[in-house]
Image (tube, rainbow, N blue to C red):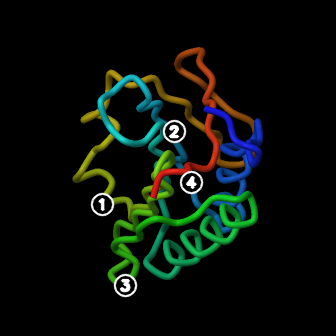
Amino acid sequence: MSTENESPDVLEQIVEAVHQRHGYHVEALDMSEFPLTMDIFLLASADNRIQSRAIADHVERTARELGWRLHHKEGYDEGSWILLDFIDLVVHIFLPDTRKYYNIEALWSDAPSLKFEDKSGLETDEEFTFDIAPSDKN
């Protein structure tokens, strides 16, 4: 995929936005090989509902600055699982118990994953790259 707004480090910038609001256990799942509409699930944890909303707000602001349009948002008022749908990138922000209960990582365990360290740098289970850009889909 290629558009004029494409940035090679979009994922890193979104992860940094999560970290700036103290989100943790950030993991990206490469969904591009599955018959779904998105390329990446980005999962993150927050300690409480206020923090999960702060992360969501900051991710949404950062994505908008990068040229990404929010297509759909769910769970913001309740705050235990917030979903931000940018079409090609879907960000999930969970409280720990909710993340453990739904266990999306296990559900999509055959998807390549990229785990980000909580402070800085990255760890990866598999070698792959994400090529994402804002979607023209509406």
Q: Residue 24 carries which label?
A: 4
Question: Relative to residue 85, is residue 48 depicted above or below?
Answer: below
Is residue 77 toward the left or the right of residue 15 in the image? left
Nearest to viewer (mark 4 / mark 3)? 3
Q: Name the residue under label 3.
A: 77
At horizontal 45% and vertical 75% (from top left) the residue drawn is: 48
Q: Secondary structure under badge 3?
A: loop
**Secondary structure beneath disc 1?**
helix
Quarter of the figure with the N terminus? top right
Q: Is mark 4 on a helix, strand or loop?
A: strand
Residue identifier under label 1: 97
Check residue 132 in the rendering and tell me which mark sits there, or answer none. Answer: none
Of tags 3 and 1, the one toward the viewer is 3
**Where residue 54 sits: x, y (%)?**
58, 77
Spatial CA distance of label 4 from label 1 is 14 Å
What element does badge 2 sit on? strand
Tag 2 near tag 1, CB within 8 Å = no
Q: Which amino acid does label 3 sit on?
A: Asp
**Residue 116's x, y, as percent?**
62, 39
Q: Could you tell me how many numbered marks the image carries?
A: 4
Q: Residue 33 at what x, y percent from top left?
A: 39, 23
> Which residue is at 41% across, 32% downward?
31
Q: Of label 4 and label 3, which has the lower sequence position?
A: 4
The residue lying toward the viewer, choosing from 59 and 23, is 59
The residue beneath circle 2 is 28
Mark 4 or mark 1: name the one nearer the start of the chain: 4
Give the residue type at disc 1.
Answer: Asp
Distance from disc 3 to disc 2, alpha carbons, whole Å, reads 24 Å
Residue 100, image x, y percentages: 29, 51
